[in-house]
Image (tube, helix red, strand yellow):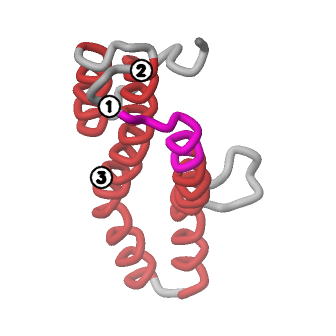
Amino acid sequence: MADGWRVDPAGVEAVLQDVASKTTTMNDALGGSEDGSVQGVATVVQDAATAAQSQVIGAALAGFFEHRQDMLTGIQNRIQASLYGAAGATRAIVEGDDEMGASTAQANAIVASGNGDFSAFDGLFDR
């Protein structure tokens, strides 16, 4: 471990797992679960619009969530990028690459949070 850093990998992992668990709950609520057991916002809004029995109310509900979709996607991207960036930086510090590796992980997280491209983190957890 580098002289300038004191990182508890087990502690970082516990925090990241806790955040990831809460993120899964949020992502399921927004987009629905992969297994279909949780309906996402789009399905719930469509059901609510149908239940309202009003074309105007249905269109307003759909329009509201459509307008907010980019913001919700941005939130999801920033959370995921933060998890990957923290995991990557922690791994780099533990492996003694605190300057280049940790900085690169943080820079990759910033880019991914903006564009949603997480390919820079491919293989991060395969080591």
What amino acid does circle 2 point to? Met
Q: Is residue 66 left or right of residue 37?
A: left
Residue 34 position, x and y percent, is: 69, 44
Depth check: give the residue in front, 53 or 42: 42
Q: Which residue is mark 1?
A: 5
| Camera-side mark, 3 or 2 | 2
- The correct choice, above or below, for 78 with respect to 3 in the image is below
Q: Is residue 10 magenta?
A: yes
Quarter residue 28 falls in: bottom right
State the SS at label 3: helix
Mark 1 vs mark 3: which is more N-terminal? 1
Q: Which residue is mark 3?
A: 70
What amino acid does circle 1 point to? Trp
Q: Is residue 4 magenta?
A: no
Which mark is drawn over residue 118? Answer: none
Q: Is residue 61 left or right of residue 70?
A: right
| Mark 2 nearby-residue class (10 Å; few <14, some 14–19, many ≥20) | few
Which mark is drawn over residue 1? Answer: 2
Quarter residue 91 falls in: top left
Residue at screen point 30% across, 32% down = 109
